[in-house]
Amino acid sequence: MDTYLDLLRFCAFVIVFLTGNFLVFALGGWVLFYKILGPHIPHRRIHAKDPTLAQIKTELKNSWSTQMVFLVMALGLWGLWKAGLTQIYQDPSERGWVYYFLSFMIIQLLHDTYFYWTHRWMHEWKWLKPFHMDHHRSFTPTPFAALSFHPVEAISHGLFWYLIASLIPLHVSWLFIFYSFMFYINMWGHTGYEFWHKDLLDRPLQKILNTPTHHNLHHKYHDKNFGIYYNFWDNLCGTNHHKYAEEYRAIKAETEKHKTNFIMKKLGL
Ligand SMILES: [Zn+2]
Ligand SMILES: [Zn+2]
């Protein structure tokens, strides 16, 4: 009976958690970029066309089914945890705080690798390709595209949590904190607006980071730019799109031109 109640409580918590994340990052991102900020920052815009209503409807429908898949998979993981079949732990002092914070970096690097390779395979393997094309229905991606996946692709994303929970000691809080972090970064990648520094690609330590322009080119051409947080794997495997630097610099040049015009206008020149 207690286990039953625990499961129901966990289920309710996950529903609230997933809904909250969607409202903050997807809906919040869309309102921020397409209703509040967007009209004032056309010089930061990556794509010229507006998303169609049909595309947004598809993104919302797919996001709903993705979250259903995540809910079911979260319940499955909870079951494995309670059965002692994972390395999930509850007391942070069990592994120490150094490990607790280090876990974030470990999860991020593992997820970056997992995302790059599963994403690349989805583009290369005939039997995986059909399942990934739902995400590519977003020609001019919006923050709603962040979770716009076919259920099979959603399962492949969810499996990452099973993998790390069995591979490394994982404090339970990271399952939720890292999900929010992933959603936040994913939302940025789909905003359609570029905010990174104009010299990012010329700075050796910073050009390792991926940008919204990078992912936008992936939606445009499909065959390159598979990474999520970092450019490490794309760089190493030669899968950066050859137009990446050129397009990034063109958007940044537009932003700089706007800044100069704005200052000159203020000075009355
Ligand atoms: Zn995308
Ligand atoms: Zn893709």
Image: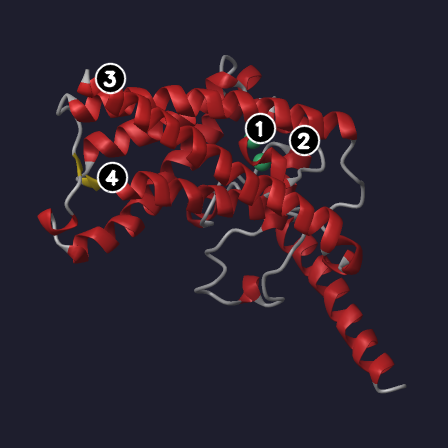
Residue plotted at (79% across, 69% down): 258
Cβ(mark 2) to ligand 1 < 8 Å?
yes
Q: Nearer the viewer, mark 2 or mark 4?
A: 4
**Mark 1 Cα-neighbour bin, 10 Å: few <14, some 14–19, many ≥20:** many
Q: Which residue lies furthest to the right in this view?
A: 269
Q: Name the residue under label 1.
A: 148
Answer with mark 2 or mark 4, whichever residue precedes in sequence. 2
Where 101 falls versus 69 (above or below)? below
Q: What residue type is labelled 4?
A: Val
Residue 47 as seen in the image, left or right of residue 212: right
| Label 4 secondary element | helix
The quadrant of the rendering that contains the N terminus is top left
Q: In which quarter of the image is ligand 2?
A: top right
Q: Mark 3 points at which residue?
A: 4
Residue 192: x %, y % from top left: 68, 47
Q: Which mark is residue 138?
A: 2
Q: Which amino acid does label 1 sit on?
A: Ser
Residue 77: x %, y % from top left: 27, 24
Residue 51 as seen in the image, left or right of residue 87: right
Q: Name the residue under label 4.
A: 172
Whether residue 260 is visible here, answered yes or no, is yes
Q: How far apart are marks 4 and 3 (CA)?
A: 20 Å
